[in-house]
Image: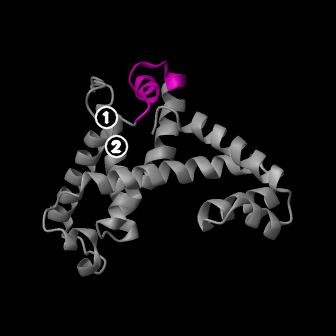
Amino acid sequence: MNTTSESLLFRLHDGSSVARGDAWTSFTKLYTPLIFYWARKMGLQAEDAADLVQDVMAIVLQKIGDLDYDARRSFRGWLRAVTLNQYRQQLRKKKLKLVDASATFLASHPSADLAEQTWDQDYARSLLQHAMKSLQPGFAPKTWAALETLMKSGQSVAEVSEQAGIRPTTLYSAKARLMRRLKRQLEGLL
């Protein structure tokens, strides 16, 4: 399943210089935290993870013009391969120190390839966090806190609205508005 927005890839590849700049900004906001998270999950220290992100982004910037988009193939799969290859190259070059390697994901999985499902879950979680952060200013602080409680706690709307001191209809309405906005923002990405 391809979950990278086709329009974003098109703007990175074929857009005007202004469209490419805007697309690159969107791309880096989406993927920088995710690649950094993957690097840390692989056991890199923060500084080395930041270096890996820069290396991966430099490769993406260099190769995106030559990349022929094929909807049947996964852009994220390509990005994952670039990230893993850069990780391995850094390990070979620098003999990087891993943070408590026994506790890392790689140490618990003998193969150097991370499970695609884990990468997909990380990607979805990263997109959702990014979208939620961007939507928060559109809600009153009290309503936003109630929405967060509702989503994280598993409590009913009635329970959360009572705790937050807001009407259940207000919370239902806010939840519906949030879901519509999330759907619109994540369209083409999930």
Q: Residues within 10 Å of mark 1 (few under 14, many from 20)?
A: few
Looking at the image, residue 42 lies above or below residue 138: below
Q: Which residues are magenta?
A: 4-19
Residue drawn at the location 22% of the way across and 68% of the way down: 106
Q: Amino acid at mark 2?
A: Ala
Q: Quadrant of residue 161?
A: bottom right
Residue 71 on the magenta segment: no
Q: Position of residue 169 (x, y in %)?
A: 82, 50
| 42 left or right of 180 in image | left
Residue bearing mark 2: 58
Q: Quadrant of the N terminus?
A: top left
Q: Quadrant of the C terminus?
A: top left
Q: Tag 1's secondary structure?
A: helix
Looking at the image, residue 27 lies above or below residue 35: above
Q: Amino acid at mark 1?
A: Gln
The answer to whether marks 2 and 1 mark residues whose Cβ atoms lie closer than 8 Å is: yes
Residue bearing mark 1: 62
Q: Quadrant of residue 184?
A: top right
Estimate the spatial distance between the alpha carbons at disc 2 and disc 1, rounded to whole Å: 6 Å
